[in-house]
Amino acid sequence: MTAAVSVAEPCVLSCSGLGFAVRDAQLLHDVHLAIHRGETLGLVGPNGSGKSTLLKLLAGVRSPSQGAIHLNGQGLKTLSRRTIAQTLAVVEQQADTLDTISVFEAVALGRTPWLSALSPWSAADTAIVEQALRDVDAAHLSRRTWRSLSGGERQRVHIARALAQRPQILLLDEPTNHLDIQHQLAILNVIHALPVTTVIALHDLNQALGCDRLAVLERGRLVALGTPLEVLTPERLLHTFGVHGHYLTDPFDGSQILRLRAS
């Protein structure tokens, strides 16, 4: 679990009155959220609750229908894509390329926001890419082609590319999707150890217990916000997720574990 983050920490990413609609479908309704420096905020909710949509809006990948987003106190829509990319990295559920490139080259794309005619590729960039690959246990894939990777391997490379950006804020949409349990746990350990602010959408509620705070979404609305034990109550689990749940204490380390049953 990450260290507790004081609410006195400055807000680095926020939204107010955030809404998003596609044709006649309102996917997000009036979301207000302030994310503090250094915290890990988990987004949880049933399928279709708006988690992916909210992440895309916060990342600037989509523009909201209503409301505003601020990054380090500045309106997101006033910032250049380069400035945003130097501050914030996003790992989406699905990302692909038709290019024939190596894994190293795919991860090296994460350095793009930092390169210019005055700051060309250097040994420091190479070292950052190599470290990012080691962080996700993918250094041995460096010379492989992107097309030759399995779904789980591609997911790790996506995360490595985001790490290579050296962002202050990391947004992840179900980053453990497609991964076996060993790599799920390893990736979550890497994410929690990073000296960055993290917003992460998760399906596994026991994995979500490792976050500092959880935002619970239901049908596009933010219905609960607080520490995991504050918001994942038996009542909330039944009302939002449609399951019965209670907590057990792990005799190994005393941590709380959710036991879920069908309603």
Image (cartoon, helix red, strand yellow):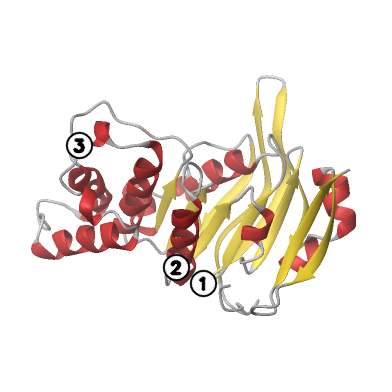
Which residue is denoted by mark 2 in the rendering? Answer: 196
Q: Secondary structure at mark 3?
A: loop
x 63%, y 69%: residue: 212
* Residue position for label 3: 145
Q: In the drawing, does residue 85 fall left or right of residue 59?
A: left
Q: Residue at x 15, y 45 (%)?
A: 143
Quick one: label 3 or label 2, which is nearer the N terminus? Answer: 3
68 horizontally vs 248: left or right: left
The quadrant in which residue 246 appears is bottom right
Q: Secondary structure at mark 1?
A: loop
Q: Nearer the viewer, mark 1 or mark 3?
A: 3
Residue 72, horizontal then vertical, whole percent: 49, 63
**Residue 170 visible:** no
| Extreme residue toward the top, this view | 23
Image vertical order of residue 140 relative to residue 128, above or below: above
Q: How far is mark 1 from mark 3, CA to CA?
A: 35 Å
Residue density around tag 3, few if under 14, some if 14–19, many if 20 or more, within 10 Å: some
**Disc 3/disc 2 C-alpha distance (Å):** 30 Å
Horizontal and vertical percent for residue 181?
A: 51, 53
Closest to the observer: 90 or 177? 177
Mark before the other along the chain sequence, 2 or 1: 1
The residue beneath circle 1 is 38
The structure residue drawn at horizontal position 77% and vertical position 68%, both measured from the top left corner, is 229
Q: Quadrant of residue 228?
A: bottom right
Mark 2 Cα within 10 Å, few/some/many (few <14, many 20+)? some
The three-letter amino acid code for the residue at tag 2 is: Val
